[in-house]
Amino acid sequence: PFFEVIKVETQQQAASVVVDKLAKDLHEGTLNVIGLATGSTMIPVYKKIVESPLDFSLVTAFNLDEYVGLTPTNKNSYAYFMHEHLFSKKKFKETNIQNGVAEDLEVECARYENKLNEHPLDIQFLGVGENGHIAFNEPGTPFDSVTHVANLTDSTLGVNSQFFDDDEKIPNTAFTMGIASIMNAKKIILLAFGEKKRLAIEALLGDKITEQLPITVLKKHPHVTVITDILID
Ligand code: GLP
């Protein structure tokens, strides 16, 4: 297996590393389907991509997750985040994200997972939650999970609610690709910055693989790149 840790000083440096990797894969023709993530971690990466000459017009994108109940025009939705930071500025062949206001949640999960199966991910980007969650797969999520509706933990609600205005209530459920859906990607690039993510990164670099720390599943993946500013001794 391939497992590399790239230590960076700044998020800008990390963004440059990502853009170089994407440029190489696009050039070699091995990047047709890309899995994208939301969160503050990804913002400098998308900014760098937007500033770059990289051409994604033949690339299909899938996002990891979306809050249940939020429309794409709600500024807290991940559809809105992606539009703001990337999709309104870079042309993609097609973009996909779960429909936050789908009538039938189960049907929407199945639709998304089927579509993913038809378009195997070449690269999946991941951030990580302070409690080790990936996408919205919270601690305890089975490793064989596919796209599903997740109940968000108090930890995640606490951290993520800071992006919502006081009068807006953060949904406590979200659509998310499952652990198995993520593990199907050919390559994974995980980014983590700041001491708040130390616990998660230490778990990823330690020996234990446990559903209590979802990020540890990546130790079973054949091709992982970790880009971080956290110094681990
Ligand atoms: C949310 C997202 C995750 C993301 C995490 C970390 O919970 N569902 O995909 O990795 O936030 O966010 P941030 O990058 O803002 O630290």
Image (tube, helix red, strand yellow):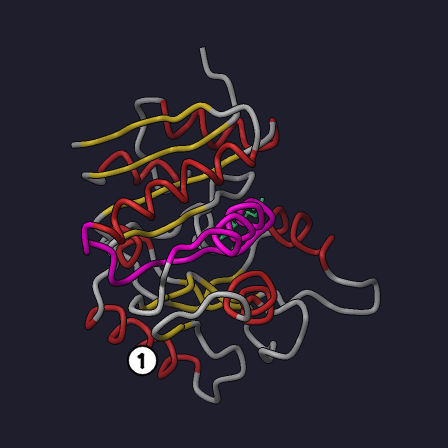
93 relative position to 162: left or right: left
Please tell me which residue is depicted at 19% across the width and 54% down the height of the picture. 30
* Residue identifier under label 1: 111
- Tell me which amino acid carries mark 1: Arg
142 relative position to 80: left or right: left
Give coordinates of residue 90: x percent, y percent: 47, 65
**Label 1 neighbour load within 10 Å: few <14, some 14-19, many 20+:** few
181 relative position to 194: left or right: left
Secondary structure found at label 1: helix
Does the magenta portion include 38? Answer: yes
Please tell me which residue is depicted at 33% across the width and 52% down the height of the picture. 124
Query: Looking at the rendering, which quadrant does residue 167 occupy?
Result: bottom right
In the rendered image of this protein, does residue 56 appear above or below residue 192?
below
Give coordinates of residue 66: x percent, y percent: 51, 68
Q: Where's the N terminus, which quadrant?
A: top left
The extreme bottom residue here reads 103
Q: Where's the C terminus, which quadrant?
A: top left
The extreme left residue here reads 1
Give coordinates of residue 136: x percent, y percent: 47, 56
Please tell me which residue is depicted at 68% across the width and 65% down the height of the picture. 170
Please tell me which residue is depicted at 22% across the width and 68% down the height of the picture. 119
Front in this rendered view, residue 153 or 40: 40
18 relative position to 117: left or right: right
Q: Is mark 1 within 8 Å of ligand 1?
A: no
Which range is magenta? 28-54
Front in this rendered view, residue 135 or 224: 224
Does the magenta portion include 199? Answer: no
In the rendered image of this protein, does residue 113 appear above or below residue 8?
below
The extreme front residue here reads 53
Give coordinates of residue 171: x percent, y percent: 63, 68
